[in-house]
Image (tube, helix red, strand yellow):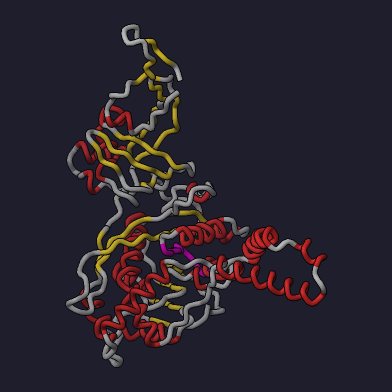
């Protein structure tokens, strides 16, 4: 810290030094032109992803209420809440290495209290009893600290509970993801759809809304026969004899051996149900081989869910087969490791929010919207063709303050960057786009590398803008 001497009061006054950086931004020329000519409003710039607040179509809501049938509404709602909480708290199965590492630490803990040296002082019978006691203590601590994973089994009633608990939420998540895909590639008109872990058909509901006139085949795979039957019943509007309005809908309980290719492949909220990493990779590789266009991976926006999505993304991008080469479309503007997961000390997941209206089964049900966090990845076969891919993604809430907006971005270099946008420093177009963009949107501009400048002296009474630049005492 450097000091200045005040001659009148004879005390030391600290001076605040801050290393500033100028971040260059280059807004897309078409966006600048549209904003200047008033043909484009900032809130509708091409990086904004909508919708942000979703609810099930009325027809689907009515059908889901109908399939509850004679089941007690109160019990269904209670079980739905329990299921939802359980799914949100799930971990993948622990690996053998993780279990061994935990056991090693526990053995060290137990040894500090039950030293092996004591065995030499005990008779054989006492020593055997002491060893059993020690082993029981080790196993007890290991079971307490190891996640007890088990696959969720869905019968007829459990499938209904799942539809009530998860239908609206998963519909909202997939609607936002697939809407972004449709916005990013307006030429994409899928003729075939494949969903692994299809559940009650939420992905199919969204895909049929966006591309009903184009899709000629819907192939759904879910290991639960009751879940498949319920999904088909929902398509029939809850009436078993009613004809399905979609063309060529198929259901299977296992991955087919045939090598048919599909334009759109989805694996949503399913990775947690696989017994280990080897099975996850086997399924992902099989699906990637079936993909002839885009593949969508989605999970809960928890730390574990984010890790599974990025594990899947990294695995598929590293497949050593020229015919299976692809790239990331969203949310990352790059193909390198997620910067959030690169820092092992940072427990913050890469996730995004979505608001949705939960299904109301009775007048007592809350009509308030809920917010869910999700993690996802959209991959595409072949080389990069989207010129907007390098646009940075906003990965946390935008902070709009007086005459400036703070955006936390993931950049094309695979780094997290905070940018404080002002009209004076970055121009009217960049500032207008930044202040109306939200968590999950992209900014239609290139963010340049940091250009360090000389230290500047600041006083403690400077503006709120400069305080947000993370000042340091030097």
Q: Main secondary structure of the magenta part?
A: strand
Residue 442, placed above or below residue 421: below
Q: Magenta stretch?
A: 289-300
Q: Is residue 215 left or right of residue 293?
A: left
Q: Residue at x 31, y 7 (%)?
A: 8
Which x, y percent locates residue 157? 37, 86
Which x, y percent locates residue 145? 56, 65
Whether residue 277 can be seen here: no
Residue 255, placed above or below residue 30: below
Residue 31, placed above or below residue 361: above
Magenta-drawn stretch contains 295: yes
Quarter of the image for residue 406 reads: top left
Q: Which residue occupies the foreground of this view, 445 or 246?
A: 445
Q: Quadrant where the C terminus lies? A: top left
Q: Which residue occupies the foreground of this view, 296 or 440?
A: 440
Q: Residue at x 57, y 73 (%)?
A: 275
Whether residue 161 can be seen here: yes
Q: Residue at x 49, y 47 (%)?
A: 339
As drawn, the residue found furthest toward the top would be 7
Quarter of the image for residue 399 reads: top left
Which x, y percent locates residue 228? 41, 83
As drawn, the residue found furthest toward the bottom would be 241
Task: Report the number of discs.
Answer: 0
Q: Residue at x 28, y 61 (%)?
A: 355
Magenta-drawn stretch contains 248: no
Q: Which residue occupies the foreground of this view, 182 or 334?
A: 334
Which x, y percent locates residue 363? 17, 77
């Amino acid at each position: 810290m450097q000091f200045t001497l005040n001659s009148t009061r004879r005390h030391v006054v600290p001076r605040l030094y801050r290393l500033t950086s100028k971040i260059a931004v280059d807004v897309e020329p078409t966006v600048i032109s549209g904003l200047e000519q008033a043909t484009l409003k900032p809130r509708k710039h091409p990086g904004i992803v909508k919708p942000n607040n979703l609810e099930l179509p009325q027809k689907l809501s009515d059908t889901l209420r109908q399939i509850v049938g004679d089941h007690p509404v109160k019990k269904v709602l209670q079980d739905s809440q329990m299921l939802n909480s359980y799914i949100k708290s799930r971990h993948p199965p622990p690996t053998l290495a993780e279990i061994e590492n935990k056991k090693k630490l526990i053995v060290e803990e137990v040894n500090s209290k039950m030293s092996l040296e004591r065995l030499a002082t005990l008779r054989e019978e006492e020593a055997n009893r002491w060893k059993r006691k020690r082993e029981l203590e080790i196993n007890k601590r290991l079971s307490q600290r190891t996640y007890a994973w088990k696959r969720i089994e869905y019968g007829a009633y459990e499938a209904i509970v799942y539809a009530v608990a998860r239908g609206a939420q998963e519909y909202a998540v997939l609607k936002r993801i697939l809407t972004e895909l449709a916005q990013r590639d307006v030429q994409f008109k899928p003729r075939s759809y494949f969903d692994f872990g299809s559940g009650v058909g939420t992905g199919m509901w969204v895909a049929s809304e966006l591309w009903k006139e184009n899709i000629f085949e819907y192939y759904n795979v879910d290991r639960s026969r009751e879940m498949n039957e319920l999904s088909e019943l929902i398509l029939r509007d809850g009436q078993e004899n009613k004809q399905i309005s979609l063309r060529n809908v198929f259901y299977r309980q296992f991955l087919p051996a045939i090598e048919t290719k599909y334009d759109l492949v989805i694996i949503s909220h399913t990775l947690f149900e696989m017994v280990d990493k080897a099975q996850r990779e086997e399924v992902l590789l099989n699906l990637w081989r079936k993909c002839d266009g885009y593949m969508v991976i989605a999970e809960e926006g928890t730390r574990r869910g984010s890790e599974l999505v990025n594990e899947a993304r990294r695995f598929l991008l590293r497949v050593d087969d020229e015919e299976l080469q692809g790239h990331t479309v969203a949310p990352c503007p790059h193909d390198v490791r997620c910067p959030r997961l690169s820092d092992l000390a940072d427990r913050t997941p890469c996730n995004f929010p979505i608001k949705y209206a939960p299904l109301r089964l009775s007048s007592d049900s809350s009509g308030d919207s809920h917010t869910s966090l999700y993690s996802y990845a959209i991959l595409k076969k072949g080389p990069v063709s989207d010129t907007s891919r390098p646009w940075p993604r906003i990965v946390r809430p935008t902070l709009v303050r007086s005459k400036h907006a703070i955006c936390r971005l993931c950049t094309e270099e695979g780094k997290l960057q905070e940018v404080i946008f002002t009209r004076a420093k970055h121009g009217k177009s960049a500032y207008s786009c930044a202040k109306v963009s939200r968590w999950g949107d992209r900014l239609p501009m290139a963010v340049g590398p940091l250009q360090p400048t000389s230290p500047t002296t600041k006083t403690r009474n400077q503006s709120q803008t400069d305080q947000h630049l993370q000042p340091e005492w030097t």
